[in-house]
């Protein structure tokens, strides 16, 4: 399977837009929302195309610092996201979690960001625990003292 989750930076852009708009307005902020989730990857094990559909839930906390900078924590997880493969008609289940911690300076520029993203797709052809499985783990740290650091990326497909 190919990587297909919502781009982490797109999620951060959602959170950042909200943060910039409200960072000065409150001493601290916590908010959450649920939105429609869709993606359409291909399963490299079977050749199936999948249209995942369900919900994603995002929680974010913003803590302003006395110097005007602020700290942001974001958590995203999918909820009830499933797909039917084409042409097989097989069922697929998606589990995705992203945690992001970022610091921004007084001009709302990122100074440090740390993200852990974990995605699992199960191909439930026979509803067995050893069906096809795709797993991807990303650990991404950026903007440490203005210098990006390498990304850790691990992905594994188990075709049964």
Image (tube, grey):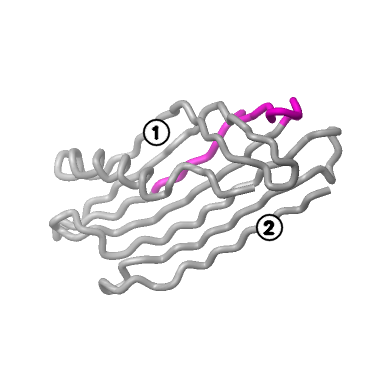
Percent position (x, y) of residue 101? 39, 56
Residue in the image at 66% along x and 52% along y = 135
Q: Is residue 40 magenta?
A: no
Percent position (x, y) of residue 16? 27, 45
Q: Which residue is mark 1?
A: 32
Q: Which residue is mark 2?
A: 156
SS at badge 1: strand
Q: Is residue 75 magenta?
A: yes
Residue 55 located left or right of residue 50: left
Kindly indicate the quadrant of the structure image that contains residue 129.
top right
Residue in the image at 15% along x and 44% along y = 24
Q: Which residues are magenta?
A: 74-91
SS at badge 2: strand
Kindly indicate the quadrant of the structure image that contains residue 122.
top right
Which tag, 1 or 2, sits closer to the chain's start?
Answer: 1
Percent position (x, y) of residue 11? 38, 43
Residue in the image at 76% along x and 29% along y = 88
103 or 121: nearer the viewer: 121
Residue 38 located left or right of residue 14: right
For marks 1 and 2, give the CA distance. 31 Å
In the rendered view, tell whether residue 78 sits above or below residue 115: above
């Amino acid at each position: 399977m190919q990587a297909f989750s919502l781009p982490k930076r797109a999620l951060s852009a959602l959170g950042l837009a909200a943060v910039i708009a409200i960072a000065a307005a409150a001493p601290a902020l916590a908010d959450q929302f649920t939105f429609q989730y869709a993606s359409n990857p291909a399963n490299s094990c079977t050749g199936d195309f999948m249209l995942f559909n369900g919900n994603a839930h995002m929680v974010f906390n913003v803590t302003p610092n006395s110097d005007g900078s602020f700290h942001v924590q974001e958590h995203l997880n999918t909820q009830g996201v499933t797909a039917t493969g084409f042409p097989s008609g097989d069922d697929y289940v998606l589990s995705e979690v992203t945690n992001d911690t970022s610091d921004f300076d007084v001009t709302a520029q990122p100074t440090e960001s740390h993200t852990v993203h974990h995605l699992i797709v199960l191909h439930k052809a026979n509803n067995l625990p050893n069906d096809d499985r795709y797993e991807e783990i990303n650990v991404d740290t950026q903007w440490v003292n203005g210098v990006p650091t390498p990304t850790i990326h691990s992905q594994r497909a188990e075709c049964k």
